[in-house]
């Protein structure tokens, strides 16, 4: 069934609590994520299966209209939210999604759940349900959402977590403290300074970053309910580094970060990540997700982003690979036509 947006306050809490309690929760399956993406051209909808009035499975789905035709692509980022050992429940959910897709002209559904790659029984179940793997061989990040990530375990005591860092990383944390770098949770007034650092970092490292208004929207939509937090490192009353994290369930996820290269010698990034880990642990998180890295084979990175692996590994972060992206074709004719058009455009 489709959750009724007209009853937002009632269904929002119900849906988010279901996502938060699931095995692989993600902010990208929250109700608010759909509201955020609505400002960038997507049309969100939440589709669920219920048992005895309780949500048993579901997906927050983003619909992207295809220009000039009354059709759209469907994407459930880091979804669906389901017991991945229950094939019958998946079949029921897909029936609901097909029904909802028919109302909006959906031609295909893309999913990329946070299911670890070693769960081969899940990939087999997905493929039996009609999905086709559409990931790429790109060893860097590996998909729309990163397929290759690294996480630090936050379950030990703080002293044990810090002791697990590489010795140089522990030294850098203490160096930043000696040089009077401080870390605090940021306010909306800090967004311009953070975004300036992010822009400089994007230019230096050659990646693209969204416009400033998108980050304003993140702050306004996600932070009130604790789904996002911005932290900044300061020295001599000036912001020199910042990190935006998403929080859902038992994980805090590093999403965006920027820093001033002139201040690298003071090691603000090492202290910033350490303090965020301490904060996340106090919120009940059991892992700090450093997000995208290069693919690893036998413990060695094989992509061009291997430097990210080495930096994050210094925080005792462990490599994890997810199952990747899968497409379920809902309208073969329109899907073939769309793929042909994309190939023609290069």
Image (spheres, rainbow, N blue to C red):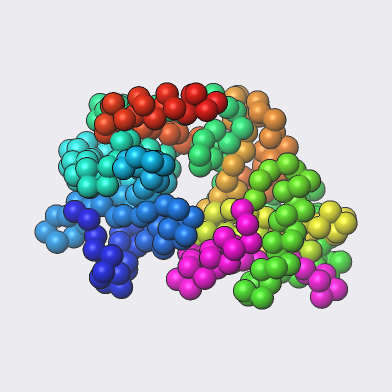
Q: Is residue 18 above or below residue 236?
A: above
- The spot of residue 74 in percent (x, y) is 35, 43
In the image, taking residue 231 as reference, residue 68 lies left or right, namely: left
Magenta range is: 210-239
The quarter of the image holding the C terminus is top right
Q: Residue at x 42, y 24 (%)?
A: 340
- The spot of residue 132 in percent (x, y) is 35, 26
The answer to which image quadrant residue 6 occupies is bottom left
Please name whichever residue, 307 or 39, is drawn nearer the observer in this view of the structure.
39
- The spot of residue 244 in percent (x, y) is 61, 60
Whether residue 24 appears in this view of the structure is no
Q: In this view, does 196 lie above or below 49?
A: below
The answer to which image quadrant residue 326 occupies is top left
User: Residue 235 magenta-drawn?
Assistant: yes
Spot the residue most to the front.
68
The answer to which image quadrant residue 160 occupies is bottom right
Spot the residue most to the left.
52
User: Residue 32 magenta-drawn?
Assistant: no
In the image, taking residue 149 as reference, residue 196 lies left or right, namely: right
């Amino acid at each position: 069934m489709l959750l009724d947006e007209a009853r937002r306050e009632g269904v929002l809490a119900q849906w988010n609590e279901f996502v938060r309690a699931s095995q692989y929760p993600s902010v990208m399956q929250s109700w608010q994520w759909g509201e955020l993406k609505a400002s960038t051209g997507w049309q969100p909808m939440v589709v669920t299966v219920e048992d005895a009035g309780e949500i048993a499975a579901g997906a927050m789905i983003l619909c992207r209209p295809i220009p000039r035709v009354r059709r759209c692509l469907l994407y459930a980022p880091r979804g669906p939210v389901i017991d991945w050992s229950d094939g019958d429940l998946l079949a029921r959910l897909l029936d609901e999604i097909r029904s909802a897709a028919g109302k909006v002209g959906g031609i295909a559904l893309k999913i990329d759940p946070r299911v670890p790659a070693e769960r081969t029984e899940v990939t087999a179940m997905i493929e039996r349900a009609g999905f086709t793997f559409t990931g790429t061989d790109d060893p860097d990040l590996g998909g729309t959402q990163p397929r290759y990530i690294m996480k630090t375990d936050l379950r030990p005591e703080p002293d044990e977590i810090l002791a697990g860092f590489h010795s140089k990383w522990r030294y850098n944390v203490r160096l930043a403290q000696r040089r009077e770098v401080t870390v605090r949770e940021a306010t909306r007034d800090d967004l311009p300074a953070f975004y300036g650092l992010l822009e400089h970092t994007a230019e230096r490292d050659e990646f693209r970053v969204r416009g400033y208004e998108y980050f304003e929207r993140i702050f306004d939509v996600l932070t009130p309910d604790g789904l996002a937090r911005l932290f900044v490192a300061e020295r001599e009353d000036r912001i020199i580094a910042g990190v935006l994290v998403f929080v859902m369930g038992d994980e805090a996820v590093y999403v965006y970060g920027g820093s001033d290269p002139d201040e690298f010698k003071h090691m603000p990034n090492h202290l910033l990540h350490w303090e965020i880990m301490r904060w996340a642990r106090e919120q009940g998180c059991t892992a700090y997700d450093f997000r995208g890295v290069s693919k690893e084979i036998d413990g060695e990175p094989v992509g061009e982003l291997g430097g990210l692996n080495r930096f994050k590994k210094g925080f005792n972060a462990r490599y994890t690979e997810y199952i990747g992206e899968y497409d379920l074709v809902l309208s073969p004719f329109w899907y073939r036509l769309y793929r042909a058009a994309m190939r023609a455009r290069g």
